[in-house]
Image (cartoon, grey):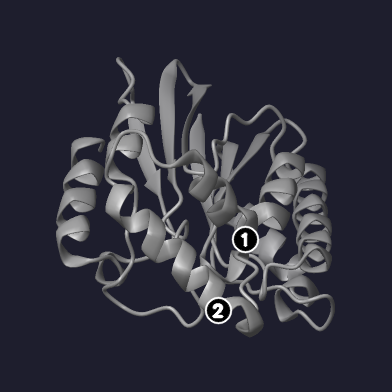
Amino acid sequence: MRAAIVHFSDIHLRRSGNPVIESIDQLVNAVNSVDAAVSFFLVVVSGDIANTGLGTEYQAALRFFREFESKLRALRPDAAIEFVSVPGNHDCVLPKSKSTLRKTLVQGIIPSIQDLKQDEALIREVVKAQAPYNRFRKQLRKGSNWSGICETTTFEYGGHVIQVNLYNTALLSQNPEEQGELHVPMQSFEQQIPLANPVGLSISVFHHSYLWLESNVAVSFRSLIVKNI
């Protein structure tokens, strides 16, 4: 019995004219041909699913992933297929006309972002930019416990536990995004994502590379990821 990770990232779907959708048969055949012994496919979608974060783009995304799943199931009827995802900066609705408002909200929350409990009113306003993504996410994976900040989920396979740790590094994204400026809520990450015991494999999923995070935050975040391997 084998498991496979199928990784999608930065597909930037629009309402129409998407090369990745037009190539779906080739993608499915490529995944199917890797290993005939695979009986569990974990599909990891690590952000920038949409191009501008609009609901119509997520409708196209949901159709794409449902068709991908259906075509793969037709080839592997006995295999389990599961989806997990995190948002990227393009999964935030950040119109230029509201860039000053977004900047004000982000600057307002940064002083408390490393506290265990942030300003709830500010958090609600900040996460509104990802509302279409969050609706898409609920449809892609039923029964999720996504807090809008992070989530851990586990799968049992072949007598082993696979833990997937999902981090929202795009929580405070702005348009344009500045390298080395992003902050993430480290204490919330640490509290909400403990490492299960026992766990056969721990996978951390996030969109931004460490270079996009503020330097001190990047060091702390990388340490957390290493600890949860």
In this rendering, the answer to whether 227 lies above or below 51 is above
The quadrant where residue 13 appears: bottom right
Q: Which residue is mark 2?
A: 99
**Who's the residue at 75% across and 54% down the image?**
65
Dot 2, how many residues are within 10 Å of its Cα: few (below 14), some (14-19), or many (20+)? some
Q: How far apart, in angstroms, are the residues tagged by discs 2 and 1?
A: 12 Å
Disc 2 residue type (three-letter): Ser
Left/right of residue 173 with respect to residue 96 in the rendered view: left
Could you say whether the residue bearing mark 2 is in a helix, strand or loop? helix
In this rendering, the answer to whether 98 lies above or below 43 is below
Dot 1, how many residues are within 10 Å of its Cα: few (below 14), some (14-19), or many (20+)? many
- Dot 2 or dot 1: first in sequence order is 2
Left/right of residue 216 with respect to residue 112 in the rendered view: left
Could you say whether the residue bearing mark 1 is in a helix, strand or loop? helix
List x then y, in percent, for residue 216.
15, 59
In depth, the one of 48 and 178 nearer the eye is 178
Q: Which mark is residue 91?
A: none
List x then y, in percent, for residue 191.
32, 28
In this rendering, the answer to whether 164 lies above or below 211 is above
Disc 1 residue type (three-letter): Ala
**Who's the residue at 83% across and 67% down the image?**
56
Q: Tell me if I can see residue 173 in this picture.
A: no
Task: Between label 2 and label 1, give the one nearer the viewer.
Answer: 2
The quadrant where residue 95 appears: bottom right
**Who's the residue at 77% across and 35% down the image?**
77
In depth, the one of 176 and 98 nearer the eye is 98
Q: Which mark is residue 129?
A: 1
Q: Tell me if I can see residue 163 in this picture.
A: yes
